[in-house]
Image (tube, coloured by chain):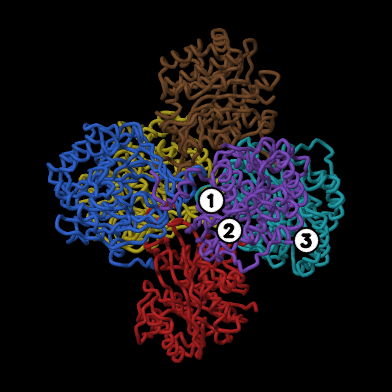
Chain colours: A cyan, B brown, C yellow, D purple, E red, F blue
């Protein structure tokens, strides 16, 4: 059941003060590389797929270090274009208790933001692929990147590849109006749509009828909006995660899926303490791709995805470094944390 | 609303084994500098005031490092006398769960403990100041330091400066009897008195009539003792924090204020996990100074102070490295710890 | 009440990625040395006893480092034989929240696994001793080590030394059948038997009659099985700990003791967060040895042991680096974690 | 002799793998802040001057950290404008033996590169100043920054401030042609010109007549070119350092000065091993400013500067953290490195 | 000129105390993975070849980490068999000045030492390959590994692959007699023989006629022995490095090559200080493979190899993380270590 | 030839910024424990003797950590008195190239400085001892410590113990006049006198007749002064080391011995680079004690001592962590630093 999975996006250098120290206290930064679609690729590689991450990175050693980070965890880097000036950066200060994590972006002018169609041969990239995933961040990076996203989607469709999107609205990258003008036309290529109710509203203009407040609503309240999204864009699946933020160290976590007929709500996880919340959504996307590719029911696929993303919160860095066996043990009910000797 | 705020006291070298390791395990110590009144000065600088810390430090590089730590966070060091032999030291082992933090003091014979009136020109120091803060630690260091405290208070009064004290009884520095003989005569200079019921008893001889047990009593039980303190010493404000110690990693936290007429009790915070509890009281004093200088009501001032000190528990080191915006976000009700992107 | 306490077993090099990082992420390993009986020896040294650890270690610097780790904490290393090729290793990845800790053993062919009777003079070792402790790991290492265990027990009995065992079944070292064939004949030397209901079943064949499920049963359910074990092997004491695993970061912890007449259940501790769970059982054994050697009742002995092992969960490394005073403060009821200044 | 010294330029975040590790090996970066003119300001602050660094930095915490780094070492940050998006970055890999250090710049679009005249009040900045220093990097950053340089020079002249420049040609920032078109018109404001023969050629078009090869020529060969530069631009002093690069770990170092009349060549230092070569030239500029402000002869000024910069090679980071006393001890002849107890 | 290069051998976990600390001082070990033939594979991957490393590694995370280390630097791991119990270990203490580095091996019973022919399909492995390299360590690990070496050589010859060996005698793994009995019969498969005069004597029985003392002899003294080796085993090339050990921090380094007709001696490098000497020989082998595959003359090939290995001494870890451009810059004469901006 | 060796003095907490960073740069300090006579004890323990270090240390964990540091390396701590307030501290900044190391002492009021005769039973301590060593630092600490030194010497003589002194004049602890008034009367107990010509002059008033300049004179120039010292105080041996300080990273090192009849000068060592120069003299004393106890001639004893101390310069920390075998390998002529596999 090993599949070729392709993702397209940006991988950034992430710089964070160690532990819970604040930006102004630190004289060293922990270095990892990550970004929405790269994180999904690593998850898929961990689950045994041939995961290809598509981006553009400078020739210099910082660019090479991003390539190496992907290779280390088994992601195929054959389709990464090299050139451009910058690796995008984000600074992350990890919060704790009532102090939130902070992100400072410094990603403008990165190599992928300035990449051209000429940098990629999407037909070669999509040939033989079983899945193509992108997120709302990719077209938000730049107009050029939005065009690349469109080209990749078209190629995917030409080659019969399943396409998933994580809507992932980022207010620092674009406005609601711009997002909708770009995202809505891309939905026709999408089979599997992932995103919470905020994303749905901001990217696709789907406003919940009733009183859906983030993190507090009854999951069933999402059913109607899923049905409408499913209808309008002919999605095979509409999926959303539901995070309860008690504090920076303690969250609740579950998810929902709708296949046009049935609506399924996952188990709920209580995550305490949280080691690293960044990449939680991406680890969910990685899990749902593996789940839908390999599990007999949407419910089992979703339980795999939500357990995978619960585990991600215990792993430092953007990447979700867990195995199928570990995810299945948790999905199967063992959250006791007993020592594995 | 930027004010000149002056604090007087000792800044020590703090040596702590990294993370939760024990003293006997460590082959390196984390180095920060801190001390009650220095910590208050840093808070005030962070909130945009011209905060001056007054002390004496040796000429050598360890003394200079203490100066640099203050300058780094914007504290004015113009009035720091240089000379003497030692920078006082305290060793801190950070506790966790049911294992308490441990402090070993090695502060005798420090430069400030042996400083003279000749080292400081208190009239110059107090000129133009809006606030002068000291704590019960300063006069406890040595008789010379007690004399310096008196001189500073007199100068403050000559210049019409508001004076606050954090009673802060330290049993390793003096006895209850000695404390009262020194502290009581100093109260006539004080406008704002901060201290819990233990401090009030040990420093000022105020024994609660009824059954006030630390951390468990109804806050209202403090009202009567506040009224009596207020009456006897003509304080403008009597203020106390109330800590519930569930474990070294989990505390409850709130505070009370009384302005001679009205008694106000703050919101309660549940802090879990605690990163660094040292300086929690000082961050409260820094917050109340800013609050009383800038907020329209004592209630708003107190809410600022208690939110500031709740946040301090998430910041490593003695200094409370938070901004007005961060404190107000928490005081305003957002303790969700959601990532700030 | 300082006694000569002897323990026999293996001390291993423990390699762990720092903090909560995963094995595959790490480019350094924290180094400590530990192992069931070595850990017990360190506890006894900390409580003021003349604790001797008996093992065999290579002449090279890694072997010497293990010796030094013991000496550092006051364990007597006079009876450690030197020679052989390897120091056994275990790799430990520390879990958090729902992600469990993982152990990878690489201990085959260690010096102690290949040691001979000729390496030790057990009569000299047991002379003047007040206590001899071993665990089910020692005879499981190799047939040679099982023979050493038998010889040590015989010498202990010749010298009138009290013998305790921690049953400690390890499924990676031997089968249930092999364990019983080795362990049962050794029970005739044992005065104090420590082990949970799983150990009792796997090592000694004691199956609970009724429905005793690990960590969830009423402690009283253990009484009957304790009575039967006590009868069959003429143990002076039968003792068990009871761990509730809510997550890798949060456990419940208590223990029970039976002296042939009375059954006593300790206080229950809620441990959150856990710093290092490895060595928790060993710290209990160390505590019960000190308790039975020095306390007037089995109840007081047990409370000391369970408080000691609760504290162990807050100490990194295998060794329980706590003092009698710290254990007694917790056993006496102060779990507030207030700063000790 | 404490003077107000002003410098104008960029301060960058410097990210370097620890020790001698390579970029691709590192999972943390050491963080310091530095840049040509900021480094000069720190030197001047260390020597007791009121050193003001003028730049623009974003409001966010990375910008604040740069401000804090300056404040920590006593640089006045009153004239730093806040705003813009980016703190410029440079990545530094520290070489050793025959492996050279590598620098990757990521400084385009920084706040200072996009700053306006409206961000600074140069008349206020230059008022009361005794010295203004800039380097060829500042106008090379952007056309806007070149315009700022010109405005600052004009204001300096209006206020009778001595102006020094370190020519500092950087081929990654501009071409020889562009450099000359910008730099030559700025020379009319300059009193003290610092730069090696390569800088002189690339920035000012001064080609040595004869065979001057970097690092190997007799220092006297520079005399003629100094005389010509002095004549054409009416410099009060022309100064150059002379580095011999035996390897990344071992350099020779000396300097020359010409005051229009006399030519003086300093002592030669053999630096082995080198800890951090970055900022070596800036530490020389800082030293020559202090030297010319306080020493009776150009020779003594130069010896101070060259000793200061020799010491810089032993200090990690961009900043030269040495005192007047340390520099004078070395300039006075003690290079024995005996322990100072 | 990208070629498929195959190497066969063991990759070990290397544990070293940080910096120059001694084994007994350290409470953490730096972790890298390395081993003769793995190191060669990394060099070849760095130079742009499709480098495949063939070995066997356990399924567990330590085995996986070794795989990841190879993948990170671009080595193909498709032919690595998974299974067995142990990753071989070596402990390395890095010497300095007159204190030598120390290695403690703990590699017995590793997965590759116990691997079978059934673990590898050598025909598939050698198909399309341009080069196969192994060292004298591989057959010395175990009799099984010696058999694997023979099978690999035969397959290489069947597929017309050039075969190189680095004789690399290791006295802790086998005796001179055993070495010769295994190595001599394998020489018939070898085209390129690398090894110093000690290796030649111990592995192949070639005793220099005259007075060749390691590190001090005139390189020309090697000519005759090269000629004899070349004749007896029909090697295309005989190659040797020549190290002068002045101290652990300072070595001289050069090499010689003989193609059956001409003898060429490389430039001499003076390496001071040395960062990491381990893998120096392997980096030479990697360099000579690239050199012979791509350079027009044996002299140019040798200069590439000796420059590559000189650079290796400045890179920490077993792997030589340098690029073709860096090697050629040094081979081309630039050893000045000037900063590359 | 294992002997009981006793040393008396102070062990301090040493705090140093990591690597070559400066005091003002550091936010952590490396922690080791050391002091002249403690360092000698560790050397003797390493060479297989029963080395007892006598001092007084506080009961708290910092005092305990000093005890543990000694135990770790095999020093017997049975005679260490516990009590008092402080562990003496010294701050060490490690120099490099022309930047010297700096020491800041903070040792006044330490437990040993305030210890009484009642703290020690010198007859028990000296019983069975073969050697007693102290240095000029011990009586310089305080008058009480000088009295302890006298009592220890008397007890040593009562028990027929050989007594050695390292004169070790420290100008921060006392004046030349005070030193002579204390030291001269103590010389009657001394058999072996170690100290350079500066020590001899400052402690004992021996001024060289001729022109003996530190580090540059011909060793033979010392002969006459040794003869005179030997005569006046009836020393069995007079011994001196001779250091040439080329830089903080590069020293020359040799020594001389005179037994009343013959004068012997050791080999000369060139030490480059130096890792840690502190404790170099103590490692020499430790070496000469072992040498005179076990070697047939004074020459062999001296060669052991000078090789031991040369090696010390490559070991970080105060303690010389080397074995007899390592010292003898270097004394025997192998300074090549070749890897020991």
Q: Nearer the viewer, residue D40 or A236?
A: D40
Quarter-of-image position of residue A13? bottom right
Quarter-of-image position of residue E243? bottom left
Kindly check if marks 2 and 1 are in contact, taking CB atoms under 8 A apart as contact.
no
Q: Is there one chain holding both mark 3 and mark 2?
A: no
Q: Nearer the viewer, residue E315 or C99?
A: E315
Is F97 above or below relative to E266?
Answer: above
> Can you tell which of label 2 and label 1 is closer to the viewer?
1
Q: Nearer the viewer, residue B26 or B13?
A: B13
**Measured from the top left, where is residue D116 in percent x and y?**
78, 44
Q: Nearer the viewer, residue A95 or B249?
A: A95
**Measured from the top left, where is residue E71 in percent x and y?**
59, 66
Which residue is identified by label 3?
A115
Query: Residue placed farthest to the front in the image?
Result: D261
> Can you tell which of label 3 and label 2 is closer to the viewer?
2
Q: Mark 1 and mark 3: span between their CA atoms? A: 55 Å
* Residue positioned 44% across, 24% down in the render: B141
Which residue is identified by label 1?
D299
**Measured from the top left, where is residue B199 in percent x and y?**
49, 18
* Circle on res. D93: 2
Secondary structure category for the residue under label 3: loop
């Amino acid at each position: 059941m090993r599949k070729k999975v392709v993702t397209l996006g940006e991988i950034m250098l992430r710089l964070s003060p160690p532990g819970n120290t604040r930006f102004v206290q630190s004289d060293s930064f922990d270095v990892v590389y990550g970004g929405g679609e790269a994180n999904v690729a690593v998850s898929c590689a961990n689950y045994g797929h041939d995961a290809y991450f598509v981006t553009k990175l400078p020739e210099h050693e910082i660019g090479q270090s991003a390539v190496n980070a992907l290779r280390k965890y088994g992601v195929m880097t054959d389709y990464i274009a090299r050139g451009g000036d910058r690796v995008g950066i984000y600074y992350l200060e990890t919060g704790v208790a009532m102090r939130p994590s902070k992100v400072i972006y410094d990603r403008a002018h990165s190599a992928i933001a300035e990449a051209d169609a000429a940098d990629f041969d999407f037909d070669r990239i999509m040939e033989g692929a079983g899945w193509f995933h992108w997120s709302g961040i990719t077209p938000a990076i730049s107009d050029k990147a939005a065009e690349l996203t469109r080209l990749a989607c078209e190629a995917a469709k030409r080659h019969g590849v399943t396409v998933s999107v994580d809507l992932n609205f980022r207010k620092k990258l674009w406005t609601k109006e711009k997002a909708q003008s770009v995202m809505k036309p891309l939905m026709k290529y999408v089979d599997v749509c992932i995103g919470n109710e905020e994303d749905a509203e901001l990217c696709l203009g789907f406003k919940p009828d009733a009183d859906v407040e983030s993190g507090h609503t009854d999951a069933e309240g999402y059913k109607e909006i899923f049905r409408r999204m499913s209808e309008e864009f002919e999605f095979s699946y509409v999926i959303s995660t539901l995070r309860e933020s008690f504090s920076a160290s303690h969250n609740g976590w579950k998810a929902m899926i709708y296949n046009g007929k049935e609506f399924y709500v996952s188990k709920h996880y209580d995550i305490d303490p949280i080691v690293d919340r960044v990449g939680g959504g991406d680890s969910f996307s990685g899990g749902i791709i593996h789940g839908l590719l390999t599990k007999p029911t949407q419910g089992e696929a979703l339980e795999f995805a939500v357990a995978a993303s619960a585990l991600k919160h215990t792993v430092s860095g953007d990447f979700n470094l867990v195995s199928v066996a570990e995810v299945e043990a948790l999905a199967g009910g063992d959250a006791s944390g007993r020592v594995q000797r």
